[in-house]
């Protein structure tokens, strides 16, 4: 019964579509088409408002100092900011990532930033392969809309699908440091798992971006 009903809806949809295509004046008023179109073009599984709310959660993480201090611009200089640092300032000791973003031109990040950390206040925090994010993944000083658009653009996110972005946030060890930063640094909001879920929800809503 149910499948017969669905088939007839599908046929109705096809015929009204065909009628619309021919642009014939005899095709009648479009009122009957409204319910049928839903079976043709499936809506995203999550409403846009819910997707935008989920993006706010992602943005709160991306713009937090524990993430943004490494996602810096073309000056290649990591940032010290957040409550434990006082006023925002460039990384001390004249550190620069250089174009390599790993400090190869000056002193390598991993000279001081080890794989693990002591947890002492003001000691260099540690996580595997500590270095700056690529310049096209700059988050610091960018608006929510700007980060949103680059976040879903494979040309600017390391060639990742939205699912791969979600998994990177859930599983990457460098990202994980943001929630366990050691010393008296303030952790990024929420958790890796919650941020992963927020990216999934945002993606299911069609990855909508805010206006600003
Ligand atoms: C000479 C040692 C040294 C080198 C080299 C170094 N750092 Fe640091 N870095 C530190 C110390 C120490 C701190 C913590 C300062 C504090 O907590 O007051 C720090 C903190 C940071 C922070 C702030 C983390 C936070 O809490 O949000 C970032 C980002 C950072 N370093 C990135 C880098 C990058 C990228 C490189 C390589 C381009 C690098 N560092 C090279 C010693 C170093
Ligand atoms: C120590 C520096 C550092 C910190 C801190 C850091 N990242 Fe990154 N991030 C990187 C590097 C390096 C890459 C590039 C890795 C790659 O492409 O394999 C990257 C890439 C990413 C990517 C994928 C590409 C893109 O468009 O950005 C995401 C997502 C990401 N980071 C999320 C985070 C989140 C969330 C936090 C905070 C919880 C964070 N990162 C903190 C260095 C950092």
Image (cartoon, helix red, strand yellow):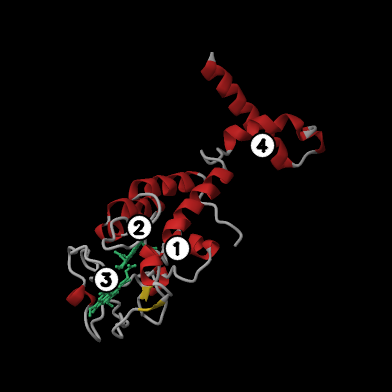
In the rendered picture of this protein, how many numbered marks are placed on residues? 4
Residue 58: x percent and y percent? 45, 54
The answer to whether mark 2 and mark 1 are in CB contact below 8 A is no
Looking at the image, which residue is at 26% across and 80% down?
A: 103
Answer with the quadrant where ligand 2 appears in the image: bottom left
Q: Earlier in the sequence, mark 1 or mark 4?
A: 4
Queried on whether the Cβ of the residue with tag 3 lies below 8 angstroms from ligand 1, the answer reads yes
Identify the residue shown where x is 39% and y is 55%. Answer: 161
Decide if residue 12 is on the left or right side of residue 181. right
Tag of residue 187: 2
The span from disc 3 to disc 4 (Cα, nearest Å) is 66 Å
Judging by the rendered image, the residue that carries numbered circle 3 is 122
Dot 1: within a 10 Å radius of its alpha carbon, few (fewer than 14), some, or many (20 or more) residues? many
Near-viewer residue (52 or 29): 52
Q: Earlier in the sequence, mark 2 or mark 3?
A: 3
- In front here: 74 or 92? 92
Residue on which the image places disc 4: 17
Q: CA distance from mark 2 to mark 1?
A: 12 Å
Residue identified by numbered label 1? 63
Q: Earlier in the sequence, mark 4 or mark 2?
A: 4
The answer for how far apart the CA atoms under marks 4 and 2 are is: 54 Å
Among the 4 quarters of the image, the one containing residue 81:
bottom left
Q: Are marks 1 and 4 in contact (CB under 8 Å)?
A: no
Please name which of the two marks, 1 or 4, marks the residue nearer to the observer: 1
Distance (Cα) linking label 3 and label 1 = 22 Å
Q: Helix, strand, or loop for circle 1?
A: loop
Q: Secondary structure at mark 3?
A: loop
């Amino acid at each position: 019964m149910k499948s017969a009903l669905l088939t007839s809806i599908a046929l109705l949809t096809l015929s009204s579509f065909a009628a619309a295509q021919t642009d014939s004046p005899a095709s009648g008023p479009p009122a009957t088409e409204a319910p049928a179109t839903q079976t043709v073009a499936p809506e995203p599984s999550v409403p846009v408002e819910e997707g935008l709310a989920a993006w706010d959660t992602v943005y709160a993480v991306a713009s937090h100092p524990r993430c943004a201090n490494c996602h810096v611009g073309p000056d290649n200089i990591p940032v010290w900011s957040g409550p434990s640092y006082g006023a925002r300032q460039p990384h001390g000791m004249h550190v620069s990532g250089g174009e390599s973003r790993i400090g190869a031109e000056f002193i390598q990040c991993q000279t001081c930033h080890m794989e693990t950390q002591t947890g002492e206040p003001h000691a260099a925090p540690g996580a595997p392969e500590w270095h700056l994010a690529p310049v096209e993944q700059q988050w610091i000083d960018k608006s929510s809309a700007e980060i949103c658009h680059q976040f879903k653009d494979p040309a600017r996110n390391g060639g990742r699908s939205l699912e791969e972005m979600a998994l990177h946030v859930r599983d990457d060890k460098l990202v994980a440091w943001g929630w366990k930063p050691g010393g008296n640094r303030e952790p990024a909001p929420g958790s890796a798992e919650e941020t992963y879920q927020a990216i999934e929800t945002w993606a299911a809503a069609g990855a909508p971006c805010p206006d600003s």
